[in-house]
Amino acid sequence: MPRTARIAPKEFVYHTLTRGNNKQDIFKDEEDFKQYIDILLKYKSKYNYKLYHYVLMTNHVHLVIEPTENGGELSQIMKGINLSYAQYFKKKFKHTGHFWQDRFKSIIISKDEYLLACGSYVELNPVRAGMVKDPKDYPWSSYKANAYGEKNDLLDQHIFYDKLATEETVRKEYRSFVQQMLKKNESMRGEMNRRVIYGGGDFTQRVNKRYKVDAVIKKRGRPKKESADKPIK
């Protein structure tokens, strides 16, 4: 598959995916998960990024992250996090060779219902993987903070919450939204595969026109007819 150009202006939110080389485990025990979270905090302080959703899976990591104007570029942030954790893991387990699989993947997310859909997609990863039945039972994600208000120093105030409801009902609204996503679990599989932009038609066209990037990485061979993008509901 040919590489796509890395388009990462600071004005956008990104869904990033980093996977262990050959899908190998990158977390072997609780200490490893905690170390990765400490590294996220360290580089959050250094590069001043915002984090809205995350999940640490056994062999990969999803982040929904927003670089800020007075902070680092997305490439700097991810390089710092990934290099720091790889060094920790290699030292602890005497690991040699490549640790991460290629570079990280990033998808531009529009700041509307698509962002909420992307975030719940991320937090439902453990459910899709069969690790838990309810996302609240998985300890290494942002779900309990976003859905129940559990204190989490990693996360920033969600930019979409004000559009959902009042402060008193926002968590309930989000839990309801995730439950709707949960009922459509199977249809969500592969939703982010090959995407470069995740948003409505106007947003996709605007990004495409300005940065000359397609919304989906095109497969080789005869193109297939595709329906218009719609947010997950």
Image: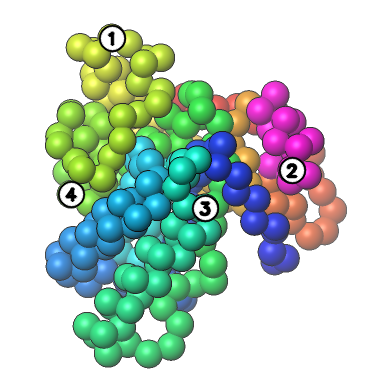
Label 2 crowd bin: few (<14), some (14–19), many (20+), radius 10 Å = few
| Three-letter code, disc 3 | Glu
Q: Badge 4, how many Cα within 10 Å: few under 14, some, many 20+?
A: few
Quarter where residue 133 is shown: top left
Q: Nearer the viewer, residue 201 or 65?
A: 65
Cα separation, mark 2 vs mark 3, equals 17 Å
Marks 3/1: CA distance? 33 Å
Indicate which disc residue 73 carries.
3
Q: Which region of the structure is painted magenta?
A: 201-215
* C-alpha span from label 4 to label 2: 38 Å
Determine whether, in the image, residue 188 is placed left or right of residue 222: left
Estimate the spatial distance between the alpha carbons at disc 1 and disc 2, rounded to whole Å: 36 Å
Q: Amino acid at mark 1?
A: Thr
Residue labelled with disc 1 = 166
- Dot 4: element: loop
Query: Residue beneath label 4, please?
Result: 139
Q: Which residue is mark 2?
A: 211
Q: Residue at x 31, y 35 (%)?
A: 156
Q: Amino acid at mark 2?
A: Tyr
Name the secondary structure under disc 3: loop
